Structures are given as structure tokens and as C-alpha cells.
Image (spheres, rainbow, N blue to C red):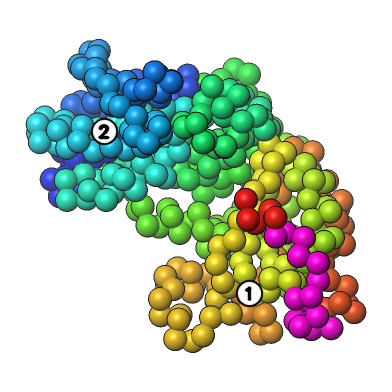
Amino acid sequence: MSGRFGGRLPVAIVCGLHSDAREAAVRRLLATVPGSVALHHDLSTAARGTVVRTVRDATGRLSEGEAPLVNDCACCALREDLVPELSRLADDGTTRLAIVELWDSVEPRAMAEVVAAHGERLAVSAVVTAVDPALLLPYLGNGDDLADAGLAAAATDRRTVADTWARQLEYAPVLALADSPLADDEDRALLAQLHPTARQMEIAGEELAVAAFAGFDVEAAAARQHPACALLPQDADECGVGTYVWHRARPFHPERLYQALEDLTCAAARSRGRFWLADRPDTLLHWDAAGGALCVESFGPWLASLPDAAWETVPPVRRAAAALDWDPQHGDRCQHLVFTSPGLDREEIGRLLDSCLLTDAEYTAGRTAWKRLPPAFDALLEV
């Protein structure tokens, strides 16, 4: 076992809705990392009240068992069963790498944080999302509910294929690519623009085994997912795929933006970022769209709205991100939205977004007048 983990069991998490690519990545790790063992929880059996766990190595299946559902939630059962199994492998002392192969729609963040919470014995050594580049756009454009696709992790699971796939893709620092003859330059350009900081490597190559021990910072990964700190993609245009960054220092008129949501959501395969509404000037709002569906969430106050004494409770990475974007008048309040898609119409997106901002007259009326504007987002933010 690598000394850098201080005797703890390295755990590499491999995820992805592209199940063939994910399974190929796990097989490759088992074949190239001596002493590696893979755990997989099959959530497709949840309707029968249990989750099936299998443990295997390069030679085949070592064991199989069942875990009962917890609160009618398959993912909860996975969390409850995963740590004891990993702890058993750690105690055995013969396992060099534990590979957690997540079921199709399970997102890696929650599982990485579960493992990291038991850091006295376990260490998250890698998070990898397996990708078939030819399936990238079809999955990103799939607005079907996971339940309709037979991929829901609980009866209350309301996620879609597209938003689940986007989070799986963007959380992992390593993307393991299947050798897909159907993939073209547009697919590769889209992948690079969606997650420009990721390390891409072929599943069949030698890099994957090394990446499995590279180490993973769970807290830093969580910060990268926060809309105030996220390292969003930059402007790009390659092989028919474009990324457009729209940045403004004036609030949206809530009613005009609400009326434009459908057009904006459908304007790109993927859009994300942070924004502010005139009637909620102290609230940081998160924009997260994929597959023709938009999720808008409140992420608490902008730093500029906090008293000085409260800044000490804010993580340093958040303060640093705010400082980079600080406006003398509005502080960290801003519009920062990024749209990525083949065939992107930058001019139309920019025109539509600009039309949703406060006019000069509305802007100069001041914050008291802004707060009296129609609260068009109340229902959406209460969901």
C-alpha cells in the first residue's frame, strides 16, 4: 500500500451513467493494479427491498451479499453498507486498492464524502468518471427523469438523466475515456469545454492505474461545486462547439428573466453559474441547466451583504473568489453565467440576457424600488 496514505486503505471511486465505459475502467484497474478489489452495489434490485453487493478481483467474484433498504432509499443502503465493507478490506491488510464502482445514477460526491468521513482507516485516492465520448451529448441532452429510465435511486428521486450526468462529469478530476469509433472532433471539443481542468486519459492506457493513487481533496472538490467558487469554463470556440461567458454587474429584473427562462435554458446543452435578482439583492442564486431543464437554488447571502464580523466564518477559498470579482459598488454580487453547446448562438444569448437586466431608469431608482418588483421567482425557489 502506498505510504502517502499513512497506512490507510486507498479507495478509488469510479462512476458514470455510461455503464459499459465504467465497467471497462474498473476491469482495467483490476488488471493493472496488483492487490486491487472492486465493490459494486446494484441498486436495480431496490424494488425488491434490497441492494445487492458484489466484491471481486481480477480473477472473478469473491463474495456477494444483500443490504436492506434504508428509509426506502437505495443510496442510503449503499452508504450504510459501503464503509463496513471497506473497513473489512482495510483490516484484512492484503488489499492494495479498493475500487468502488458506483451504480449508474449514483453521484460521486456523496460517496467520496462518506469515505472521507472515516479518514482514520480509509483515504479517497481518486474519483474517476468513465466517459464514452460518443454518448456525451445524447446524455447531456436527455431531459428524461431517472425514474422513467429505470435509474432512480429512491422513490422520491426527481433527478433527470442530464443533470445527473453533468454532475458526475464535472465533479471528477479524472475522466477515463472509452475507445469509441463513433466519437468525433465535436464530441472531444465538447468534453474539453465542459470540464477543461480534468485530466483525460484512455481507459486502455497506462495512466489510469497511476491516477488511482493520485489523491483527492474532498473539501476542495466541494468548494469547486459551490457557485461562488466554481472554476467555470472560459470562452472557447472549436470544432463547432462554443462556450460563451456572460458577465455583468447589474441585477436582473425578476419578471423579465422569468419570462425568458425557457429560451435561455434551451439555448445550450449545458449552462451554469451564479446570478442575482433585483428583488433579492442579498441572495446568491445558482443557475444549473442541462437537458432543457433548469434548477435555480438559493446559496445563501453574497459576502457583500454580511457584516464584517461574519467574514471570519467564511471559508478562505470563498473570500479569495470574491476578491477576484469584487466590484466597488456591489461587492461580489454579479451575473456570471456560462453556456456550452454545439452550434451556440452567442449573440442571441447575450441579447436575451441583457434584455432581462434592469434598465437605466430601473437601476437608478435604487434598492428600495428594486425590492418592490414582482417576486416572479418565489414559487421556483420554494420547490
Span shown in magenta? 364-378
In the rendered image, is residue 201 in sight? no
List x then y, in percent, for residue 48.
Answer: 39, 18
The verdict on residue 373 being magenta is yes
Q: What residue lies at 59% left-to-right and 61% top-to-bottom?
A: 298
Amino acid type of disc 1?
Asp
Residue 339 sits above or below residue 300 on the image: above
> Can you give x and y, in whole percent of width and height, for residue 126 in the image?
34, 41
Amino acid marked by disc 2: Asp
Q: Which quadrant of the view contains residue 14?
A: top left
| Tag 2 residue | 81
Where residue 29 sits, quadrant-wise, is top left
Q: Check residue 282 in the rendering and tell me which mark sits there, or answer none.
A: 1
| Residue at the image point whose x is 36% and y is 52% from the top | 218
| Local SS, label 1 | strand
Foreground: 370 or 276? Answer: 370
Look at the magenta stretch and give its main secondary structure.
Answer: loop
Question: Which sits earlier in the primary sequence, circle 2 or circle 1?
Answer: 2
